[in-house]
Amino acid sequence: MKHLGFASIPAVQQYLRYAESEQLNLNQAISEAGLDQDVLRNENGRIKGEQFQNLIKSLLIQSDDPLLGLHSARFVQPGSYSVLGYIAMSCATIGEAIDKIPVFEKLVGDMGVTSIRLSPQSCVLEWHCAYEDSAVRQHMIDNVLASWTNYARWLANTDTAAQEIRLERSKPGADLAEAYEAFFKCPVLFESGCNRIIFERDLLALPLRQPDKMLLKTLEDHAQNRLSTMEEEEKRFSIRVSDIIRRQLTMGSARKELIAAELNMTSRTLQRKLENEGHRYQELLDQVRLQCARELLAQRHLALQDIAINLGFSDHRAFHRRFKDWTGLTPGQYRASTGSKTRAPVFQEGA
């Protein structure tokens, strides 16, 4: 299954406001998504994309609302887009605000990617959804395009409509199709193979209600710092875990509980932080073991039994099976295929 990245808490809260308005059982939905109430109160927090997908699925089942995506778009707020929402508020025109979306949308989450295409007469704003569950995907796409529409109308203080909406979803019944057109106030084409808002290029020049050039600069600097911090934290954490695994292997064990304790966190938190980067603990452990195994096998004076113990395996047979799974070769075949005479030690205390 593809890793779905993360979703910011402000993006999640838009759906929670919808759920409250419909008097749905929020505790049930939160529990079914595997979420913690404390996490949902942290405006700067984020949850796994899989949890967000499961939350929406639970709300869908409870509400039985065929227009959940459109209806939840009513609850969009500037904060729904994290700092990107406030950046858009501070822009001078709709066009300037739209240009900020691809730059900063990762702060909102990994639910999808936006592309913008201009022609002499029109602008195409397209969203490429990353979620795979067919029911959730349909409503999330509806929500994103409808939320953009609602927020743009509020920002520009206008009820101007797009020229056309195109959706990949199958065509619904006549009543629901009419509801889409009533919301967007323009033709909506279903089964289009894409998810787009197409509008006249002249609308890019629409002025916004409260432009603030100084505040915009401050917000963009803040957003850039947050993006840089996120990227550094993600990169640093997985590398740090791998380094600790390598060091723990010198003592013959690299259990997840030991790694988590060294990082002053629970095993569950360790796994969650790795999953936020698209990794699993076992995946990192296997990568480190394979790298170390290749280095140790190059030292021909080392017995396979000793290498297996060094890598935390119970015996050489377990090492033999795992190494063959990794490389398609047995340890002996791999050693025979390399001509290295290297005898330098691999593991160093504190490496």
Image (cartoon, grey):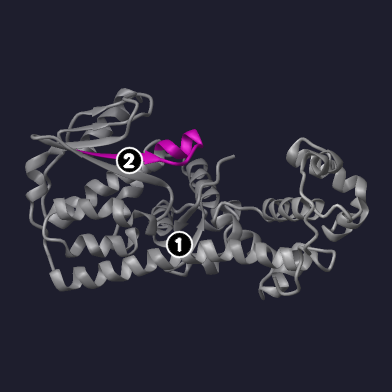
The kind of residue tagged 2 is Trp
The residue nearer to you, when weighing 286 against 202, is 286
Residue occupied by mark 1: 231
On the image, the x and y values in percent for residue 78 come to 27, 61
Task: Identify whether 316 is placed above or below 201.
Answer: below
Task: Identify whether 119 is placed above or below 301.
Answer: above
N-term mark: 2 or 1: 2
**Residue 76 appears left or right of 198:** right
- Residue at 40%, 65% in the rendered image: 228
Number of other residues with Cα within 10 Å of mark 2, as a class: few under 14, some 14 to 19, many 20 or more: some
The kind of residue tagged 1 is Glu
The residue nearer to you, when weighing 192 against 277, is 277
On the image, the x and y values in percent for residue 40 come to 49, 64
Residue occupied by mark 2: 127
The residue nearer to you, when weighing 98 against 16, is 98
Number of other residues with Cα within 10 Å of mark 1, as a class: few under 14, some 14 to 19, many 20 or more: few
Q: Is residue 7 magenta?
A: no
The magenta segment is 124-138
- Residue at 76%, 69% in the rendered image: 258
Q: Quadrant of the C terminus?
A: bottom right
Q: Examine the image and state in which quarter residue 241 appears.
A: bottom right
**Residue 223 appears left or right of 16:** left
Q: Secondary structure at mark 1?
A: helix
CA separation, marks 2 and 1?
23 Å
Q: Which mark is residue 57?
A: none
Q: Secondary structure at mark 2?
A: strand
